[in-house]
Image: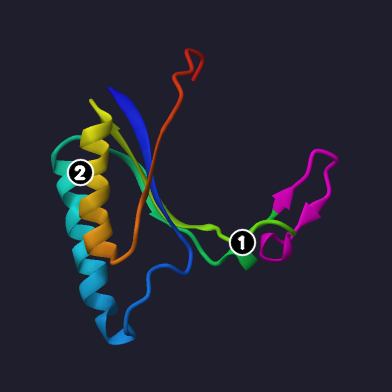
Amino acid sequence: MSKYLISFDEGTMVFPMAELDAVSEATHAVLREAKAAGVWVFGGGLPEAAGGAVVDVDGTVHDPAVRPGKETFIGGFCILDLPTRDEALRWAAKFAVACRCAQEVREFLDDPES
């Protein structure tokens, strides 16, 4: 089994505010399905980039919203423990439909010390 990060960029969930409850319920239904399947590890939505910070190697702290060269930020994510990349892509497709936005899939590297 490998752990996969499934995430989407902030600002890509674009739908009428009147549909927020339906989108939230659809997303939570997929989350509950992943929990019931025993593959859910962790996940959640993230506030706008303006609420975060980027710390450089010299300790300088930047507001990520005004950091040069960075145009997108993670808006939400989940980590699933799955047997194959194909299975991760199937779950990402479910989240894409529910969230109404594209999902990125990345496999974590195996680290024997973590």
Give SS at disc 1: loop
Q: How many marks?
A: 2
Q: Left or right? Give the position of 21 relative to 66.
A: left
Taking 44 as reference, is 26 left or right? left
User: Residue at 83% across / 49% down in the picture?
Assistant: 60
Question: In the picture, residue 49 is in which quadrant?
Answer: bottom right
- In the rendering, which numbered label is found on residue 71? 1
Locate residue 37, reporting x and y percent: 14, 38
Residue 81 within the magenta-colored segment of the rendering: no
Which residue sits at x=36%, y=35%?
4
Give the Cα distance between marks 2 and 1.
Answer: 27 Å
Indicate the quadrant containing the N terminus: top left, top right, bottom left or bottom right: top left
Instruction: Sort mark 1 into few (<14), some (14-19) or many (20+) by Cα contacts within 10 Å.
Output: few
Q: Residue at x 26, y 68 (%)?
A: 24
Q: Is residue 80 above or below residue 23?
A: above
Q: Which mark is residue 90?
A: 2
Q: Please identify the residue farthest to the top as the structure is shown.
A: 112
Three-letter amino acid code of the residue under disc 2: Arg
Q: Indicate the amino acid at tag 1.
A: Glu
Instruction: Please name the colour scheme applied to the rendered image.
Output: rainbow
Is residue 106 depicted above or below 15 in this figure? above
Residue 104 location, x and y as percent? 39, 48
**Magenta-highlighted residues:** 54-67
Specify few, some or many for label 2: CA neighbours under 10 Å numbering under 14, 14-19, or 20 or more: few
